[in-house]
Amino acid sequence: MVLEKSEIMSLRPEQAFWLPTNFFLREMSSKLAWRRHCLGFKTRFKPRKKPGLLIRGRIIPQIISTKDGPTIKFIKEISLGHEPFQTTLWQSICQGKKVSRMIGEEGNWTKQRLNEPKTFIIYADRVKQFIDMTSKNGITPAAKNEYASVLGRSGDVDIGFAILEGGIMFYRKGHHRIGCAIALGIERIPCQCYLVAEHAVNQLMKCGGSGEKLADWKQCTIEYLERMESMT
């Protein structure tokens, strides 16, 4: 299948998909995956270093439980009323783990290490603010730009997911929003596709029922997501 640049770009929808949060309980590592070759051997590569959205060939991801991520755990513990210095994240920092987050005020944010108690409390207070905002408004699309004051950046992107042969999984973007959605029991979240394996595209073309060209991607994706949701 020959993929034109314009067709690859069309994989990004103009508006976010709204998908069930339970689709995102598996996370694909952005640091490590494997590419399976036709002779059966595998080679390593880093997905986030690949330009563009479409990854050629057959991809085997490194998968972790989303709930096991340090940011998601921290948000869960804060939402349950744990004091910041009683959280798993702070304990890991005390044991030498290097953790950095955006700290500052709107328009003047810098990425800082959280190893100092004062800096850690500033971050924890921002997470509490984010939890409170989300409990009132839910998870809103990035286009509304409502998170700049608490996430430390404007012009953000939606929660990311990857589509591989094994289905959908959380990928790269939106750990704080996923954490809030899980902690608060939010059922649906706005998200966009940031990585697609070529073999997954071929599968969608075969089972989507809307055509055999990548230009039909959006309709095939919608039908695919509808089938997945009907199985949950």
Image: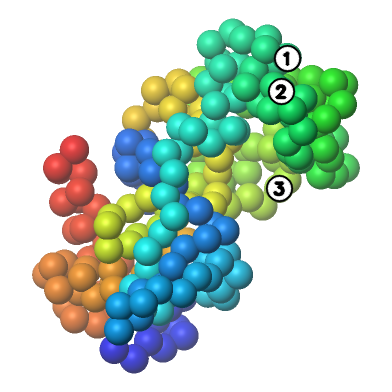
In the picture, residue 119 is in which quadrant?
top right
Residue 93's x, y, as percent? 74, 29
129 w.r.t. 159: above or below: above
Q: Residue furthest bottom?
A: 2
Residues under labels 2 and 3: Cα distance?
Answer: 27 Å
183 w.r.t. 162: above or below: above
Is the Cβ of the residue at disc 1 closer than 8 Å to that at disc 2?
yes
10 Å crowding of disc 1: few (<14), some (14-19), many (20+)? some
User: Residue tagged by mark 3?
Assistant: 154
Q: Is residue 149 left or right of residue 222?
A: right
Residues under labels 1 and 2: Cα distance?
Answer: 6 Å
Looking at the rendered image, the quarter that the N terminus falls into is bottom left
In the picture, residue 30 is in which quadrant?
bottom right
Foreground: disc 3 or disc 1: 1
Q: Is residue 43 left or right of residue 187?
A: right
State the SS at label 2: helix
205 w.r.t. 33: above or below: below
User: Residue tagged by mark 1?
Assistant: 85
